Image: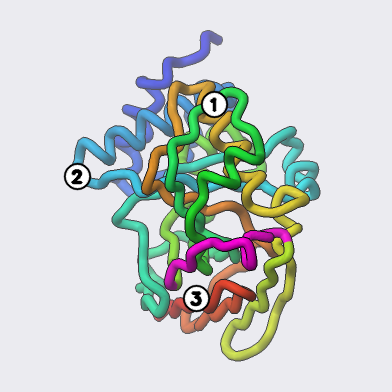
Amino acid sequence: MAQPTAEAVADALWSEWHRGRHMPAEWMGRLSMDTAYRAQLALMDRFAAAGEPQAGWKVGLTAAAMRAQWNIHEPCFGFLLHSGHKPSGHRFRFPGIIAPGFENELCLRIATRLAGPGVTLEQATAAVSHAAPALEIVEKRGPFSEDIALAMADNAQQYAFVTGPEVPLTPANRDLAGATVAVDVNATVIDQAAGAEVMGGGGFLSVQWLANKLAEFGRALEPGMLVMSGSFTRQYPIAQGDRIESRFTPFGTVTATFD
């Protein structure tokens, strides 16, 4: 069977998305990863044309163990919309989210343009000006493990992201691998982890990977963009009534509630 065009996939997913339907079965097993990412980017452009501009990017599957679990050789990316960016303390309407979960991340602000290929870790590190404590809110919109490519076309489970105040990066706090997080759900500590869990060495490696990966599709990291750089912990499910508080040292605290 011939590979469908990215535009055809995006047209179909865009139509189904607005009917509340995701990862439609008729598209399962039909997409290469390259076509899937191109469809995702075409979907992002449709959101922008409809008045929902991009805020930045997310990097997922940053842990080697997770990539091995899903049999994928590299991390993945998705796009962030301005409409999905919420401040710390935001109260979500739980019934409006499909099988929600959350991840504990640093949200990094890009200050200077990064265009691959060939972006070095030093260049990626220098391009990031701020970090904020953050939660990525995901939706399990379909059988992720059964068709990774289709899940990428459907924007890699991204629903929203919640950030606390941004902190300027200085020589004293630039060791993102050494940052830590303590995660509370309903006032009970459920996890603690270090930033080194992200890419085996911290979020700057995520920025480097993303800049070089985006170059394959003619895209770059532009000044002002935000990058959700990967979770310190595994993904956790969310139940109605949950209050999440994640304390990132030395970057501060982020909270969200699901009513």
- What amino acid type is highlighted by mark number 2? Gly
For the N terminus, the quadrant is: top right
Instruction: Identify which residue is drawn at 31% across, 33% down.
Output: 45
In depth, the one of 155 and 113 nearer the eye is: 113
Task: Note whether residue 141 is visible.
Answer: no
Give the residues in magenta.
Answer: 165-177
- What amino acid type is highlighted by mark number 1? Gly
Q: Could you say where residue 27 lies in the image, as x and y percent from the top left?
A: 49, 28
Q: What predominant SS class does the magenta segment belong to?
A: loop
- What amino acid type is highlighted by mark number 3? Val
Q: Could you say where residue 218 lies in the image, as x and y percent from the top left?
A: 44, 22
**Quarter location, residue 197:** bottom right
Q: Across the whole image, how many numbered discs are drawn on residues?
A: 3
Q: Name which of mark 3 and mark 1 comes first in the sequence.
A: 1
Instruction: Identify which residue is drawn at 68% across, 48% down.
Output: 62
For the C terminus, the quadrant is: bottom left
Residue on which the image places disc 1: 116
Residue on which the image places disc 2: 51
Mark 1, Cα crowd under 10 Å, few <14 / some 14-19 / many 20+, is many
Query: Are dots 1 and 2 in contact, CB under 8 Å?
Result: no
Q: Secondary structure at mark 2?
A: loop
**Quarter location, residue 14:** top left
Mark 2, Cα crowd under 10 Å, few <14 / some 14-19 / many 20+, is few
In depth, the one of 95 and 248 nearer the eye is: 248
Gap between marks 1 and 2, in whole Å?
28 Å
Residue 118 lies in the magenta stretch:
no
Residue on which the image places disc 3: 254
